[in-house]
């Protein structure tokens, strides 16, 4: 008698037998392996779930004779079924023909049912033991990742634990260098470790590697019969023959760290359960390596970070002084519109017959004052990407004309000539008219403040082609002291006031031009500064022209 169990390839092998050795058939029974689909009696039992009786196998043309077991004359078998699936057979063999009777068929069927229960319980128990062992190994991997600080010791410990997950011949951990696309040797289990480390790195662009393959797919992959694949050289492994390999990517977050490679020297078919356990081990190993890398990187950055913090603290003290000055000079951004409002209020009182005109000017200046106060908050909104942006198509000439008309009385009060340089062609752009008007207002306010009495201020538009694309500009040109070349970059820094501003004694925040620059950047434009010391300055806001290309894009 014997019990045969069916493996994943559909081959029935004798798990236990009795009585064959006494008749010189012990070795044959030990080596017996039959493909279920090729044995008619097995096929019948699988299909029907019922026992199979062969009273005289010599008279049965379908009988599958097994070498070394030719003395068998009659046969009785019953399927072992668990949850409707045949997992094996109980077989009774006799050297006498017509030995088995019908009553033995029924009794063997009952015995097969009892065997199925026993095998099922044994498998459940073994599965519980295996699960407990593997959970313990995963726990040890986690603890190693939390406690071991030395990278080399950690990797070797992880490789040893990984090899025990599914009792493989060996386990390897590779480390991936994304910049050079190189596979570096991390560690190997057991006696493979020293030889493995001496093999050196492998370029993934010159040799096929398991590591590069699984990192590109992001999935656990099994490789069987390696000699028939592109991985036959096995560059990730130490020297030796490895017939079956499982490779799992080591990925933590978005970081590709390497691979866990499990190898078997003998034939091995990876079950889904084994693949799942190896995947869990790889995930924990990746976290352990990522933590170790983070620890090393943190130590390397401590000194540099300390220096950065010292420098930041110095800059913070400097910034505090600058902000203190800013608080005392904040009226720079408020005084001009307030003065204009006072002027139009005076004109309303003295010339009430022109009140509609003055009220319109007053309304615009009041609105501008409101937006000037809002300027103090705009830089904060810019830093937090919360700038409101309401673009429309408009003509820059209208902005220039409007500001010339609204600020002419104020210019007269400063004894300055303020006028618009007429241009016939439209300067069409797409942008937020209020924000761009605010930028022009800041430039015009600076010109009014720093141009000496008797000087001239001109607003106008200009056209240019930049990188093959049309651009329109609106400029403010004055006959003031100009901007030195060494200041043309710094004047757009926040809180920076140029030499002319400081010498003038006029209060200012140093925020005006930085606000202009941020507004223009929001419009994908630029600010150009021209002129020379004592020869005036010209600030031009360049914006993409609303031509055919822009209309399509917008």
Image: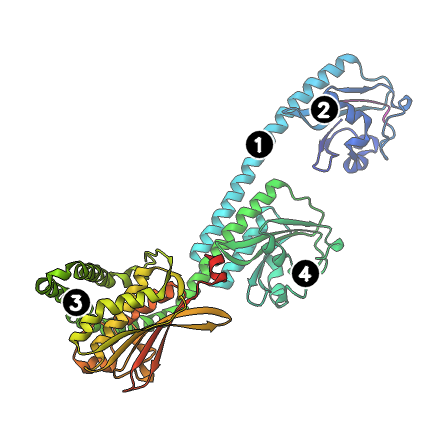
Which quadrant would the N terminus be assigned to in this image?
Answer: top right
| Tag 4 residue | 208
Whichever of callouts 1 and 4 sits on the residue coming sooner in the sequence is: 1
The reply to whether the C-beta atoms of the residues labelled 2 and 1 are less than 8 Å apart is no
Residue in the image at 33% along x and 60% along y: 433
Q: Is residue 16 above or below residue 371?
A: above
Distance from disc 1 to disc 4, alpha carbons, whole Å, reads 41 Å
Task: Report the span colored magenta.
Answer: 72-79
Residue displayed at 22% across by 63% down: 372
Q: Nearer the viewer, mark 4 or mark 3?
A: 3
Crowd rating for badge 3 (residues with CA inside 10 Å; few <14, some 14–19, many 20+): many
Question: Where, by quadrant of the figure, is residue 518 drawn?
Answer: bottom left
User: Counting residues from the N terminus, which is met first, the one under dot 4 or under dot 3?
Assistant: 4
- Is 350 colored magenta in this rendering? no
Q: Which residue is mark 1?
A: 124
User: Which label belongs to residue 79?
Assistant: 2
């Amino acid at each position: 008698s014997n019990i045969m169990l069916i493996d994943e390839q559909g081959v029935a092998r004798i798990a236990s037998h009795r009585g064959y050795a006494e008749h010189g058939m012990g070795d044959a029974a030990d080596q017996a392996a039959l493909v279920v689909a090729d044995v008619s009696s097995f096929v019948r039992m699988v299909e029907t779930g019922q026992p199979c009786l062969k009273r005289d196998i010599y008279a049965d043309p379908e009988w599958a004779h097994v070498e070394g077991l030719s003395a068998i004359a009659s046969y009785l078998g019953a399927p072992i079924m668990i949850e409707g699936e045949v997992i094996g057979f109980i077989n009774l063999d006799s050297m006498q023909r017509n030995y088995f009777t019908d009553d033995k068929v029924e009794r063997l069927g009952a015995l097969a049912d009892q065997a199925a229960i026993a095998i099922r319980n044994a498998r459940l128990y073994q599965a519980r033991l295996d699960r407990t062992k593997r959970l313990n190994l995963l726990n040890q991997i986690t603890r190693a990742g939390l406690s071991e600080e030395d990278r080399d010791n950690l990797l070797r410990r992880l490789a040893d634990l990984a090899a025990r997950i599914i009792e493989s011949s060996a386990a390897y951990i590779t480390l991936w260098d994304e910049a050079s696309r190189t596979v570096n040797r991390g560690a190997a289990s057991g006696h493979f470790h020293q030889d493995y480390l001496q093999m050196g790195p492998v370029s993934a662009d010159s040799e096929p590697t398991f590591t590069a393959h699984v990192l590109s797919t992001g999935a656990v992959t099994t490789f069987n019969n390696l000699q028939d694949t592109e991985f036959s050289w096995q560059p990730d492994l130490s020297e030796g023959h490895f017939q079956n390999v499982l490779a799992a990517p080591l990925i933590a977050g978005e970081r590709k760290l390497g691979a866990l490679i499990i190898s078997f020297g003998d034939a091995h078919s990876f079950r889904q359960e084994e693949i799942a356990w190896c995947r869990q081990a790889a995930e924990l190993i990746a976290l352990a390596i990522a933590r170790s890398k983070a620890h090393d990187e943190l130590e390397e950055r401590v000194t540099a970070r300390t220096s950065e913090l010292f420098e930041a603290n110095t800059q913070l003290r400097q910034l505090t002084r600058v902000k203190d000055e800013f608080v005392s000079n904040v009226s720079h951004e408020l005084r001009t519109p307030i003065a204009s409002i006072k002027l139009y209020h005076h004109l309303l009182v003295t010339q009430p017959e022109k009140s509609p005109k003055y009220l319109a000017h007053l309304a615009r200046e009041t609105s501008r004052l409101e937006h000037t106060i809002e300027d103090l908050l705009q830089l904060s909104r810019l830093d937090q990407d919360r700038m409101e942006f309401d673009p429309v198509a408009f003509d820059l000439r209208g902005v220039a004309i409007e500001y010339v008309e609204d600020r002419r009385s104020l210019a007269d009060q400063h004894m300055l000539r303020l006028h618009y340089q007429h241009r016939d062609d439209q300067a069409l752009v797409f942008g937020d008219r209020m924000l761009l008007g605010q930028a022009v207002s800041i430039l015009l306010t600076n010109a009014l403040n720093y141009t000496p009495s008797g000087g001239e201020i001109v607003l106008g538009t200009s056209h240019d082609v930049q990188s093959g694309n049309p651009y329109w500009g609106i400029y403010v040109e004055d006959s003031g002291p100009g901007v030195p070349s060494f200041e043309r970059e710094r004047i757009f820094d926040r809180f920076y006031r140029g030499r002319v501003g400081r010498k003038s004694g006029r209060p200012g925040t140093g925020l005006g031009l930085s606000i202009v620059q941020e507004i223009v950047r929001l419009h994908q434009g630029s600010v150009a500064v021209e002129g020379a010391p004592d020869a005036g300055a010209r600030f031009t806001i360049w914006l993409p022209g609303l031509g055919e290309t822009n209309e399509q894009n917008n």
